[in-house]
Image: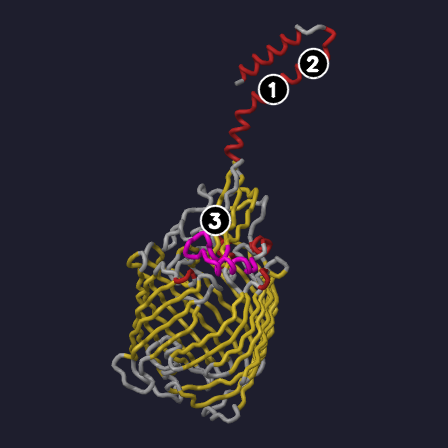
Amino acid sequence: MASVASNILLSGAVASGAVASGAAASGARRLGAFVLCAAILTFSDPLLAARNQCGKIYEPALPGYEFTGGVDRWGERALVLPDGEGRKVSKIYINSLPVFDTTDPKESNALYRWINRIHIGTRTHVISDLLLFHEGERVDNQLIQETERLLRDQKFLADAEIRVVNECGDDVELEVVTREVWTLTPEVSFKTSGGDNASSIALGDSNFLGTGKNLKFSFKKDSERDIFFVHYKDTNVFGEHYLLRTHYEDNSDGYHYLAQFGKPFYAMDVRQSWLVSAEKNARSISFYDYGDTVSSIKEDSQNYSVYYGVSDGLVDGHAERWLFGVAYNDRQFRPDPGEPLPPVVTSDITLFYPFIEYQNIEDQYKVGFNINQIQRLEDIYTGESLRSRFGISTEDATRLVFEGEWRDTFLSRRKQLLQANVTWSGNWNFDANELEETFVVGRLDYHRGQTDNRSLVLSMSGQLLEKPFPHQQLLLGGSNGLRGYDSRYLSGDAALLLSAEERLFTDWEPFGLFNVGFAAFADVGRTWNRQNLPVAEEDWKFDVGFGLRLIPSKADKGQVIHIDVAFPVGDSAVGSSPQFIAELKQSL
């Protein structure tokens, strides 16, 4: 190419020399044109090559984009940046896919097209404000994956994924692909569980006017109280990850008010956090025996707290955090008019204490599906974390106030997942030299994949209540894990529950509205009365059953409809007849 340009340039020079001297200006113009032509021809090859490499036209993900397509069910997934090195983000595209994929014949009808048209989509800045990186900044796989988790944690997004759409040397262009869900939901629901019925009428929007704000009004009636509440939550105030949460609740037996404002540790590398919280509550607390109310008292409580947290960020795959704060907790107890009192009425208790909290979180996650959801990406925590808080109160007695949580994943590989979780809270009374209302809960879950669409899940959970107040107890029954019995059928101060559940995941999506699964299960559990609570103690109870699982695929996330039929085994006692259970949970 260079030799051709030289020949052209030489020819141009010869031609100019042949022109009469009176046309010198015209010859000079010709010479300039030949020089420009030569330059273009000389550099055209590398320019074209650069365009082929860096000038790729952006092709957005289509409405039928399959979020689980590049993900193994058990968490094996290719890295977003294949070479594992950090890159500079030159461009970010936000691509919000519609609620219904009308390019799919199953969802291509007038009704679904109309819903897509009237749906108020998430505003682009709402998505971009959630990102942990911006154009011009460097990213790595850790930051991209954490941003995906943050997006998938939003109730108003069905799924989210970040992918590379163009590379140019050290620069990358990224596409943030999300799928919308229908968030404005008038709700009329009925729940029955272990003989208890509950109904509710609600109107809520987890993406109010496309802003990501959560607003809900609800009236609910259950076996314990009538509830009317208004709830508002914004996890990204001013687009700066500030948290604002308010809750107003007017109940037939009292009230519940909550207000919180602060800036949490919203990502692993965040260095500071703070929160101010105020809560007031008035309610009736019932004591049960074989599912029947045997006594009741009134509790009025106030809780106020403030803390400030610091961290060095993400270091060697861990985030260590220290929180320093002050908390005030006051609880007063009185008779519940018209209800029998417990044998001993709980004494009032006031706690006012400074506290310190330590957190250590391992940054270890996998992305899978068909684990605790159906046909949706799930962020599976596979690391170890610890949270532990201590404080000293010297109000009506000197007490060490403590609480915490520990969780770990012992096994995480293809078709196997073994996880443990322990939480605890309570007081040590130095004056009485004993524990008070100390509550410990432990859980162990094992998932064993059998085929591409079946899993066996084994679970064991234990609860321990040490030195409870007279109104406190642990319960097992239809709404507490022992599905073949009435709600709150067994009670005591220690409980153990074991469950085995066979889960079948399908790709059946009736009318494009629900992901469908099935389950067969067996439960065994019992409670112990170690501290002479005024309840009967029963031996082990068994049940078996089967159920249907429905996950709305086009509505708010975090809702799994459980419809179960459970049968007690070898027991003809009152409260042990077959149970029909229909309830809403957050996972399978």
Q: Say above or below: 123 vs 5.
A: below
What's the distance in space between the residues labelled 3 and 1, CA to CA?
A: 43 Å
Residue corresponding to mark 3: 62
- The residue most toward the left is 570
Horizontally, residue 453 falls left or right of residue 164, namely left
Contact between marks 3 and 2 (CB within 8 A): the answer is: no
Residue 305 in view, yes or no: no
Residue numbers of the magenta segment = 98-121
Q: Nearer the viewer, mark 3 or mark 2?
A: 3
Residue 37, disc: 1
Horizontally, residue 240 falls left or right of residue 284, namely right
What's the distance in space between the residues labelled 3 and 2, CA to CA?
A: 55 Å
Residue 578 in view, yes or no: yes
Q: Residue drawn 37% across and 67% down?
A: 549
Contact between marks 3 and 1 (CB within 8 A): the answer is: no
Residue corresponding to mark 2: 28
Contact between marks 2 and 1 (CB within 8 A): the answer is: no
Q: Percent position (x, y) of residue 526?
A: 33, 79
